Every structure is written in structure tokens, then in C-alpha cells.
Amino acid sequence: MRMLVLGGTWFLGKEVVAGALARGWEVSAFNRGRSGPDAIGVHAVHGDRTNPEDLQQLASHGPWDAVVDTSSSELPPRDVLLAARALADQAARWVHVSTVSVYEGWPHHPLTENSPLLVCPADADSAFGYTGPDGSPTKYGFQKAGGERAVAEALGDRAVFLRPGVILGPGEYVGRLPWWLTRAERGGWILAPSPAERRIQPVDVRDVAAFTLDQAADTSAGGAFNVAHPEGLTFAEFVTACLTVTGGAGRPVWTAPEDLTHHGVKQWTELPLWRTHTGVWAVDPSQAVAAGLRCRPLDETIADTWAWLQADGRPVEHPRWAEHGIAPEKEAKILTSLSGAN
């Protein structure tokens, strides 16, 4: 099995490469060589995927049984189209890592793979799309929908689209789980979003990588898969697991969404993973499960991420890390206000 990974040096891409090597595959990785070292055993090709000459040079290293694209999250559709067209003749299959944000109804409505997508041209530039006043739809979602269309136009039924929601685990660069872990370690009263029993369905990066490789090796027609945890866990279980693995002597203060909103707490970022929209954690992964997606218990993800952080785990520097987590002073002020109200 010969596989090309676009990216391959951090988080999901790194896990995809590691998993492919463990399966005995011949792996090439194409990246700029800036986000981390290429894995030992990988045939590294360095270049810029937005440069036609670099893509032409890359194509000369083909053909491949599969191309896996883990590096298009911040690219406009026209750049995704550029790479897809340049490599289409060298790829028997193409696995494109997308997002649930491509759905028109996310995060307001429950989602299946048959839910309508946002509309964006395959050759759109970075200016296309908009973010709604309540944070949905997102410009990011439009851009990613355009990226899917670009791959579909170039690869047809050789293309597979994976649509994860939130990916957690060792190496996370966004900072959602690391923030909750470091907050749990600090202890004390912890501002937490009610209802505590609400289930969330993030997935472990290693499980997404394994499913990605399974799809790369599949020879059936392409398609799309929602990649979300089929069982998930409640927010209370999530916070408890963070406290357990860190040894933090903290106690969550479950606070109603209207009170959090009243105090100006930003959903999704200041309290990571918290969002009030009914569809945000109502993504149906049954089609992926039927195709082989297997998700480990999220307690394991939480424990392994803490172990990675304790071992001086350093994610790739990314601006989204700084967006996550409420400032300690703001949290303390809100907690004081809530205790006074009671």
C-alpha cells in the first residue's frame, strides 16, 4: 500500500502517518517542513501546496493507492482544488478530512450524512462566506464545504469525506482538553456549564486516524462519514475525569446557560466544549460505525492527554490555543457573584 499524506507532522496527520507505518505501508508526506519533523521511515517531500510547481514536482513521486489530506483546514477552496487537480491522476483514492461545520444545519439541528451542506464554489477564494450573528453558519464552514466540492470535482467517486466534530487527544493544538485539564489541576470552585448530564461526543485523534487509514485502504466507492463518538460522555463525567487524572481538589459549580450568558461567558471558547445549540452534540455517526469506526472510552483520551502534557507535551504553536479558556479573574468574579446570589 503506497500512501501520500498532505501534512503529516502534527496531531491528526502525525497519527495517520504513525498508523500507516505500523501497518507496513509505504508512506510519503508532503509539507513545508515547518510544523515538526517528519517521522522516521517516511519519504518526505517538502514544498508549498499552493505552489503549482511544487505540486507538479510532488506528482512525479506518484502514483499512490491513496492520498490523505489532513492539511487543508485553513486553505480556501481554490487551493484545495489546485492540489486535487494536480494529483488526481496519481491517486486511486482520496481521503479528505473535513468538518461537521459544512452542514447548513450545524449546530442547530441533528445531523446525518444526508443533511444539506452549505453552498460554496470549488474555486472560491478566502473571502467567500460569512459568519452568522449567533455564530452559525460560519465562514469556516462555507470554506470547508467549498473544499469538499473541489475534491469531488477532481476525484469523483474516488473521494471520501470525513466530517469530525471535535477531535481531542495527545498532541491537541486547539487547547480545549488541555485547558480543562490544567483548570482541574488548579482546583477550587470551577465554573461549569449546566446541565451536567448533557452528553458530548468528541473523538480521540488516534481513533480518527485509524478510521482514516481504513477508508484509505477501502476499495469501494467513496462517500461521506460523520466522525463522532457514538456513546460520548456527560459533561459531569468529563469534568470528573479531568479532576481524577490531575488529582485536582476542585468542585464544579454547575451554572445555568442564561447566567453564563448574563456574565458574558463566550460559548465554545471561554468554557471549551460548551454550546447551547441543540444540534452541536447530535451528530449521527452510525454510518461510520457501520464502516468500522471504533472509539475508545473518552476517559482514556483524557488520561493520555494529561500524561502527554505532564511529559512536556508541546503542541504546534497555533493561534486557536490562546482563544480557549476563561481568564481566572473573570471566572472568580462570576463565581463570587453566583455565591452572593445564593
Image (cartoon, grey):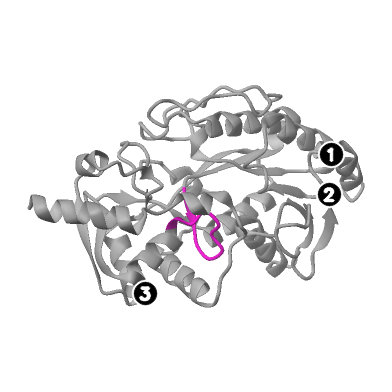
Identify which residue, 129 or 302, lies in the foreground: 129
Callout 2: helix, strand or loop? loop
Residue at label 3?
Answer: 246
Disc 1 + disc 2, Cβ < 8 Å: yes
Identify which residue, 175 or 199, lies in the foreground: 175
Amino acid carrying label 2: it is: Gly
Callout 3: helix, strand or loop? helix
Graded by Cα atoms within 10 Å as few (under 14), some (14 to 19) or many (20 or more), the crowding at tag 2 reads some
Mark 3 and mark 2: Cα distance apart in space: 41 Å
Q: Is residue 197 left or right of residue 303?
A: left
Q: Residue at x 26, y 58 (%)?
A: 332
Q: Quadrant of residue 106?
A: top left
Q: Residue at x 65, y 56 (%)?
A: 13
Give the numbered dot on residue 101: none
Residue at label 2?
Answer: 47
Question: At which x and y percent is residue 290?
Answer: 48, 48
Amino acid carrying label 1: it is: Asn
Q: Is residue 41 visible?
A: yes
Q: Is residue 187 left or right of residue 149?
A: left
Question: At which x and y percent is residue 47?
Answer: 83, 49
Residue at label 1?
Answer: 51
Q: Quadrant of residue 132?
A: top left
Mark 1 and mark 2: Cα distance apart in space: 8 Å
Question: At which x and y percent is residue 284?
Answer: 41, 42
Question: At which x and y percent is residue 173?
Answer: 55, 57
Q: Residue at x 84, y 39 (%)?
A: 51
Query: What are the residue bounds of the magenta stretch?
Result: 166-176
Graded by Cα atoms within 10 Å as few (under 14), some (14 to 19) or many (20 or more), the crowding at tag 3 reads many
